[in-house]
Image: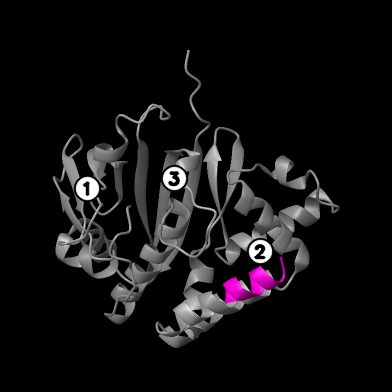
Amino acid sequence: MTTKTKTETFVYSTFIRTTPEKLWEALTSGDFSEKYWMGFRVELEPKAGGRIKILPPKGSVGRSDHGGTVLAYEKNKKLTYEWMRERHENDPKRDGLSRVTYELTPAGEYVKLVLVHENLIADDVSADGNTFKGINNGWPAVLSSLKSLLETGKAIDFVLPKDLSC
Amino acid sequence: MEKQAAVSAADLVFKALADAGRRRLLDRLRVKGGLTLNELCAGMDMSRQAVTKHLDQLEEAGLVVTRRAGRERLHYLNPVPIHEIARRWIRPFEEARLNALRDLKSQLER
C-alpha cells in the first residue's frame, strides 16, 4: 500500500472594484489573462466536463498547459477546474489532481473574489519567497495584477526568468 | 472616492499588523493553513475571547480568510493585501536590488 502525502488547501481573497461580468471575462478569456497572468492564455470550454487550457507564453521553455477538466461552471459566479493535468496526472505522490475554484460575490461597488486551491501536496508549495514558483508565491502575484488591471487598466510587469519550469 | 476606499483598506491592514499577537497568529497560519479557533488558541498566551477578537480584526483587514467545514471554521492566511501594499512603494527596477540586499542581510546574520 502506498502512503499518499497529506494534502493542503490555500485560500486567497481580494476585493476588486468591477462587476462580476467583467471579472468573469478577465478570468476566462485569453486576451485578458495574458495581460495579468504573466503571458498565460486561458482557453475555456464553457461547461462542466469541458476543457480549460492555460497555455504558457509563446517561446517559453519547460512550461506546460496548467489546465485540466472543468468541474463546475456557473457563469459570473463560480468556476472549478483541475490544475496541471498534463504534468500531475501520473504523479504517484498524488491522490487525484489539485483543484482551483474561483467564487465571485458582488459587494457594493466591488466584487469579492475568493480563490481556493485544494488537494495540494508539499511539492506544490515553495518555502522561498523570492520566486513565482509554488502556489503560495504565484497566486498572490497573479491576483494583485488582475486587480490592478481591472481597476487601473494596467497590469503588473513581472520580470519572469525565461526558463522557469512551472 | 476611489482614493478614500483604497486608503481605508490599507489602514485596516496596517492597524491589523501593528500588534505582535496578531502577527503571531499570521505566522502560525503561514506555517499551516486551515486551523480552527481551538488550534489557534493552543500555544497562545491569551484568552479565547482575545484570540477571537484578533482574528475578527485580521479578517476585516482581509489578512485572514475563513471557510466553513461542517461545524468548524477554518482560518487561512491571505497575503494578497500585503502583496498590494508591498508593490505600492516598490518600483519594478528596484526589486532585484532589494532582493540582493535581503540575501546579503540573511547571509551576514546567519
Task: Report the predominant secondary structure element of the magenta stretch.
Answer: helix
Q: Position of residue A69 (x, y in %)?
A: 22, 37
Q: Residue at x 22, y 50 (%)?
A: A75
Structural distance between the alpha carbons of marks 2 and 3: 30 Å
Q: Disc 2 residue type?
A: Gln
Looking at the rendered structure, which numbered label has been put on residue A124? 3
Q: Is residue A136 above or below residue A3?
A: below
Looking at the rendered structure, which numbered label has been put on residue B33? none
Q: Disc 3 residue type?
A: Asp
From the viewer's perspective, tell me whether residue A80 is left or right of residue B24.
left
The image quadrant that residue A19 belongs to is: bottom left
Are tags 1 and 2 found on a single chain?
Answer: no
Structural distance between the alpha carbons of marks 1 and 2: 39 Å
The stretch in magenta equals B102-110
The chain identifier of the residue carrying mark 2 reads B
The chain identifier of the residue carrying mark 1 reads A
From the viewer's perspective, tell me whether residue B59 is left or right of residue B25.
left
Q: Residue at x 33, y 68 (%)?
A: A160
Looking at the rendered structure, which numbered label has been put on residue B57? 2
Q: Disc 1 residue type?
A: Asp
Q: Secondary structure at mark 3?
A: helix
Looking at the rendered structure, which numbered label has been put on residue A65? 1
Q: Is residue A71 visible?
A: no
From the viewer's perspective, tell me whether residue A47 is left or right of residue A149.
left
Structural distance between the alpha carbons of marks 3 and 1: 16 Å
Q: Residue at x 50, y 35 (%)?
A: A7
Q: Secondary structure at mark 1?
A: loop
Front disc: 1 or 2:
1
